[in-house]
Amino acid sequence: MDRLTSLPKVIILDDILTRLPYKDAARTSVLSKEWRDTWYSFPILSICSKDFFSMHDVLLKNPLRFSNQDMLIHYVTKRLLKLLDQGLAIKVFKLNMQCVDHKKMFYHVDLWMKMVSENGVQELELRLPLPTAYVAKGCTIDQEYDLPLCVIEAKSLTKLVLRGKIRFHQAFLNHSIKLFSVRMLRLCEVLFSHEGIVENLISHCPLIEHLTINDCYIYNPLSVPCPVRSLFLHGLEKLKEADVRGIQGVYIDAPNLENLCYCPLDVYAPFKLNLDSFTNLRCLRLFFLEGSIITDKWFVELFHKFHFLESLSLLCCSMSVKINILSAHSNAWSYQYSALT
């Protein structure tokens, strides 16, 4: 007990906050001035616009949504400035912005990205989804956010999650990328001005262990965005798990990959998926659009590639009800097979 009481109070309070759900931790700020100061010095920030105003406010054009948006901006900026003034590193910064005036918000998001990137952020999650209901109401806003270059200069980052209409502009193709510590990278519904940016970004993450690329697009201001058609990644020695969806041709050189999930873009077009380098693969999940046909020959040949495969899932495909599999490594097979026949 003496050892516990000898610890600085701020360390004890911070430890208590880390053990609470984020919303409960936020509520401690009303308990006392000491708890409020501790909360504003807490290095984990998880901000969601839904906590300040709802989709209902936007669709009904509630005038309060603008004051609530200003409140959100003030709150986030104050929290970040407090940490910077105290010289405290920001461990986690999560920002989920929905139903907001994007043109107004993006200036502040740029500022926040700069503040966290230069202050040792370890985990960064930026989600800028645009709900379908918002588009259906005929709202005309610029929903595409140009990611600032400072994000890929954050050497401290270990986890980077980007979801929504976040755009990598042309400058990312040749800019110095310093994501040397990133172990988890998730890119969902992200826009790239050039297909080479995707591969350039990932190739500069030498320690990456978990990779997700889902439904990303190539952006051209003169035409409609088109899906990323191919992905070629080399030398990912540390990669253990990959989830790739919406890309027709995939080549990944990752000898230590253990878990792979893949879904092609077009069910009616040939897809290319290189599996030869995955000698340690243990879990394979292949998702197809309904009506895809998997031949018995393709299925049987798949088994002979992987000596350590333990789980295999095939979803939304048509194939034989019964397939005989012969393998010299029968003690290693323990399959979970699911398919629509």
Image: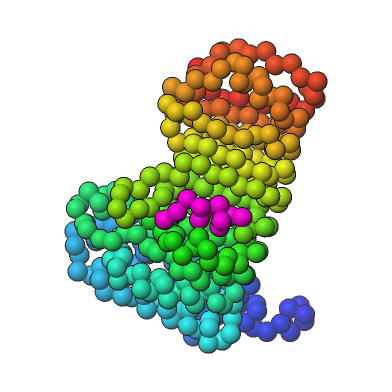
Figure label count? 0
Residue at the image point whose x is 76% and y is 77% from the top: 1
Q: Is residue 146 above or below residue 231?
A: below
Residue at the image point whose x is 56% and y is 56% from the top: 200
Colour scheme in the image?
rainbow
* Along the viewing direction, whichever of 154 and 273 lies nearer the viewer: 273
Residue 133 rendering spot, x and y as whole percentages: 26, 49
Residue at the image point whose x is 72% and y is 30% from the top: 306
Residue at the image point whose x is 48% and y is 45% from the top: 214
* Along the viewing direction, whichever of 172 and 131 lies nearer the viewer: 172
Q: Is residue 42 magenta?
A: no
* Along the viewing direction, whichever of 337 and 39 lies nearer the viewer: 337
Q: Is residue 83 above or below residue 339?
A: below
Q: Is residue 274 left or right of residue 112?
A: right
Q: Which residues are magenta?
A: 193-203
Residue 274 rendering spot, x and y as whole percentages: 62, 35
Q: Is residue 131 above or below residue 9?
A: above
Q: Is residue 199 magenta?
A: yes
The image quarter containing residue 120 is bottom right
Q: Main secondary structure of the magenta part?
A: helix
Residue 25 rendering spot, x and y as whole percentages: 52, 69
Q: Is residue 93 left or right of residue 103?
A: right
